Image (cartoon, rainbow, N blue to C red):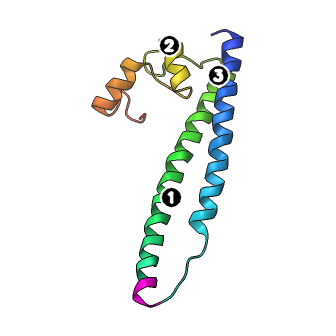
Amino acid sequence: MRARERDRFKKLLLERRAKLSGTLISMADEALKPHGGGHDADEIADMGSDQFEQELTLGLMESERQEVNLIDEALDRIEDGSFGECLGCEATIPTPRLMAIPSARYCIACQSYIERHGSLPGDHDED
């Protein structure tokens, strides 16, 4: 991959990471803010709704944290020169796939295999 393309993907990844970091901060503020602690029926129902929303927010935060980790891994691959190579078969990941998912670690064939079988053949600690 040419340096210009790597720079373009690095910029995309850094922009996405910055956006996710801001979202994570605002979600953390929302999820961790104290809620009312009343004892009448309406307040108890509200507490249940608040707890559900908090759990949903924490789940979304975990998902976004995982995406940040994938972005960090992609940035590391840019630095070591392996960005755009499939971690499974070492084939070049097509540019349209990287444009859609800049943190992609696998070509479509390997990703499809992982989704069907849980991992690549002989690979016991990846996806």
Alpha-carbon span between mark 1 and mark 3: 29 Å
Q: Residue at x 47, y 64 (%)?
A: 53
User: Please, is residue 55 above or below residue 117 in the view?
Assistant: below
Alpha-carbon span between mark 2 and mark 1: 34 Å
User: Please, is residue 41 above or below residue 96 in the view?
Assistant: below
Q: Residue at x 64, y 30 (%)?
A: 13
Q: Label 1 neighbourhood size at 10 Å, few (<14), some (14-19), many (20+)?
A: some
Q: Tag 3: residue type? A: Phe
Disc 3 is placed on an element classified as helix
Residue 67 coordinates in the image, percent (x, y): 54, 40
Q: Is residue 52 visible?
A: yes
Q: Residue at x 61, y 60 (%)?
A: 28
Alpha-carbon span between mark 3 and mark 2: 13 Å
From the viewer's side, name the closer residue of 93 and 87.
93
Q: Check if residue 122 falls in the magenta segment.
A: no
Q: Picture quarter containing residue 34?
A: bottom right
Residue 24 coordinates in the image, percent (x, y): 61, 52
Q: Which residue is mark 3?
A: 9
> Which range of residues does the magenta coloring cover?
39-43
Ranked by sequence position, the earlier of labels 2 and 1 is: 1
Q: Residue at x 68, y 25 (%)?
A: 10
Q: Which residue is mark 2?
A: 94
The secondary structure that most of the magenta stretch takes on is helix
Q: Which residue is mark 1?
A: 57
Disc 1 is placed on an element classified as helix
Residue 23 coordinates in the image, percent (x, y): 62, 49
